Image (tube, rainbow, N blue to C red):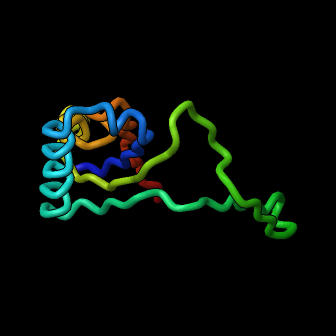
Amino acid sequence: MSTFITIGYGDRAGYDRTDPVVRDEAHRADARLRDRGVVMGVAGTPTQVRNHDGAGVATTDGPFLRSDLPLAGFAVIEADTLEQAVALASRTPCAVAHGVVEVWPLQTTT
């Protein structure tokens, strides 16, 4: 099993223009992922952290990353392959409601 991090982007306008039947199924897909142990959550307000050259911590409120759609949430998915992780992510609300989901393989360091 490999670990994948998903990042979902989406906005209310895209969500609202998606057929409610499709949205409801996407929420059921999220519930099935949680039932299999996927850790997921809605993105809160971020804080940027810097400690350049180890000289002291500086924080800035707000995101560093910018995108056309707001960041909606994250999940940690265990899957056998990238294709399987993509298939799981493709049924979630951000993917079906005119948003996008990035699937990132988590490469551990030793």
**Camera-nearest residue between 56 and 92:** 92
**Measured from the top left, where is residue 11 in percent x and y?**
44, 40
In this rendering, position of residue 98 left or right of residue 52: left
Would you place residue 67 above or below residue 26 in this image? above
**Measured from the top left, where is residue 29 in percent x and y?**
15, 48
Tell me the residue at 42%/42% (across/down): 12
Tell me the residue at 78%/63% (across/down): 51
**Camera-nearest residue between 63 and 55:** 63
Q: Which residue lies furthest to the bottom in this view?
A: 56
Q: Residue furthest right?
A: 55
Res. 92 visible in picture: yes
Q: In which quarter of the image is residue 68?
A: top right
Res. 9 visible in picture: no
**Camera-nearest residue between 3 and 11:** 11
In this rendering, position of residue 69 left or right of residue 93: right
Tell me the residue at 41%/45% (across/down): 7
Tell me the residue at 82%/58% (across/down): 52
Would you place residue 76 above or below residue 103 in this image? below
**Measured from the top left, where is residue 83 in percent x and y?**
21, 32
Would you place residue 28 above or below residue 36 in this image? above
Q: Quadrant of residue 56?
A: bottom right
**Measured from the top left, where is residue 22 in percent x and y?**
16, 36
Q: How many labels does the image show?
A: 0
In this rendering, position of residue 27 left or right of residue 52: left
